[in-house]
Amino acid sequence: MRKFLVVLDDSRECLNAMRFAAMRARKTGGGVQILAVIPPEEFQHWIGVGDLMREEARERIEAHFEVFAKWMRDRQEIEPELVVREGEPVPEILAQIKDDPEIGVLVLGAGVGKSGPGPLVNQLTKSSGTLPAPITIVPGELSKEQLEAIT
C-alpha cells in the first residue's frame, strides 16, 4: 500500500497537508503516515529532566495526532499511523522515507505570509532532485472545498 507521509508540527499549514494526504489516500486506496520529530535541543538538560521533557513532548504529539486521526477515521475512513522520531527534522524525514519503502509521497504544507513557505519546504525543495520520494506541496490558503476539488 502506498503511504502519504505528512509531518506533524505546530504550523498552521500542517492542517491542509493533513487534509490533502487523507483525501488522496482515501481516493487512491492508500494510507497516511504522520511523522512527528522531536528536536534534540529540547533534551539538553540533566538526564532526569530530559527524560521527563521527552515524555511530555510525546504526550503532546499523541494528543495532537488524535485530533487529526479522529477526523481521518470519521470523515475519510483512513486509519493513520503515527511515527515519532528524535533529531533534526529534515534528516529524520529523509530517514523515515528510506526506512519505510511503502511511503510514496511526502506531503508538506506551504505557509503563507512574508516568511515564505516554511523551513521544511525551503530545505527539502533544495534537494528535491535527489529525494527518495516525490513531494506534494499544499498551499496553506486552500479552502476545504478547494482541497476536495483537487484531490
Image (cartoon, helix red, strand yellow):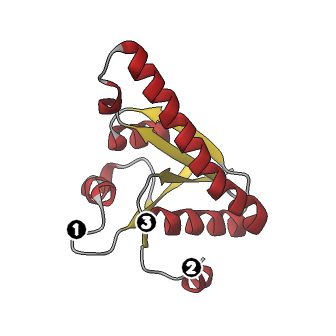
In 3D space, how far apart are the residues under numbered discs 3 and 2 (Cα atoms)? 15 Å
User: Looking at the picture, which amino acid does disc 3 mark?
Assistant: Arg
Instruction: Report if the CB atoms under discs 3 and 2 are less than 8 Å apart.
Output: no
Left or right of 140 on screen, residue 69: right
Viewer-closest of 69 and 17: 69
Residue 12's disc number: 3
Q: Mark 3 or mark 1, which is nearer the start of the sequence? A: 3
Residue 17's disc number: none
Residue drawn at the location 34% of the way across and 32% of the way down: 42
Q: Which residue sits furthest left?
A: 114
Residue drawn at the location 42% of the way across and 74% of the way down: 140
SS at mark 1? Answer: loop
Left or right of 145 on screen, residue 51: left
Q: Which residue in the structure is indicated by mark 1? A: 115
Nearest to viewer (mark 3 / mark 2): 3
Across and down, in percent, residue 48 comes to: 42, 14
For label 1, the crowd category at 10 Å Cα-Cα, with few meaning under 14, some 14 to 19 and many 20 or more, is few
Q: Which residue in the structure is indicated by mark 2? A: 147
